[in-house]
Amino acid sequence: MRKKNLALTEQKWFQILFWAVIVIAAWEIGATVVAATKRTPENILPHLYQIIAAAFSMKAVSGGMTATGVVLTSARATLLRALGGFAIGAGLGFLLALLMKLSGLVEKLIFPYLMLIQLIPVLGLAPIILAITGDINRSRLVIAAILSFYPVAANTLAGLKAVSRDKYDLMYTYAAKKKQLYTKVLIPSAVPYLFTGLKIAAPMAITASILVDTLQGDGGLGCMLSQSLKHAMSIYVFWLIVFFSAFIGIFSTYLISWIEVLVSPEKRSTSGIVRMIRKEKKYECSTEKNRTQKEPGTETL
């Protein structure tokens, strides 16, 4: 019985269900407490069933659209900006990591200042970038690229430096050129680190795009978020944007993980080995159980 309970807690679906129940229960308790205080404005922390009902209702917003439709329409602009900035930042981060690996001088001159840029809050960085670029849409792309840049560059550089000395010696034995060393050994070894940086950078790019929309307006999820907080529209729209943003951030991480499995054969083989080991453990447990039941003296009289 103890083994069955242990196996159940190790299941991913059980862990997700467990925390979902805890979060929902805590939310409903908080919503009940807030509703009892009779705050103004009302529904500042609504019940989950109220948010779900408002998602398919046309009363939450004007214009003959449901709240979900309005959120998805605004999300298109925000996600396109985040995707563009993410692609630019990831590409530049990867190229800079290669450049820093090629030249130690470049790493010493650039890498410390990249860390300083990441320490500047987005709310303080947005006006500076807007003043430099002079264009709202361009500034959004630049900010999303800056936040995506450092995680990709740092993780890729760590992957390039993680190659063991034995692999270098083997390539030197074959008289390999520097180009072959990078294409055959260094870059393939850095791919897992690159995807780790991409998983970190993708939600950051989405968050940056929403925050900049909040400051600079001109449509997008952040602009609607600001309007709903100022009660220009229903507070339910605010919570729909919060849930949607959280979902997109989680989905982006899982999407990059799925792409990593597709492009990395070792990931597929590793996942296959893990599944095989789990099947063998289940088979061993069932065999042990059957053998125990068949042993003399264990049967009930």
Image: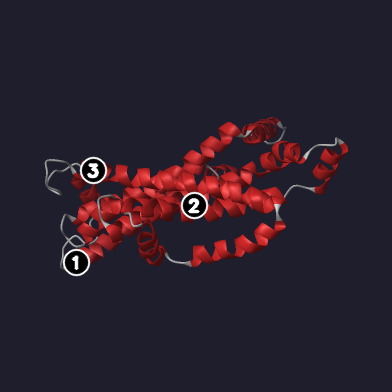
Image quadrant in which you'd find residue 223: bottom left
Residue labelled with disc 3: 68
Q: Nearer the viewer, mark 3 or mark 1?
A: 3
Numbered badge on residue 148: 2
Which image quarter holds the C terminus? top right
Compare marks 3 and 2 and give the one earlier in the sequence: 3
- Choose mark 3 or mark 2, whichever is in front: 2
Density class for disc 1 (Cα within 10 Å; few <14, some 14-19, many ≥20) is few
Q: Which mark is residue 36?
A: 1
Front one among 135 and 268? 135
Depicted 41 relative to depicted 281: above or below: below
Of the residues under marks 3 and 1, which one precedes in the sequence?
A: 1
| Image disc number at residue 129 | none
Name which residue lies at 29% across and 58% down: 216
Q: Position of residue 23 (x, y in %)?
A: 37, 55
Assign a secondary structure to mark 1.
helix
Q: Is residue 107 above or below residue 290?
A: below
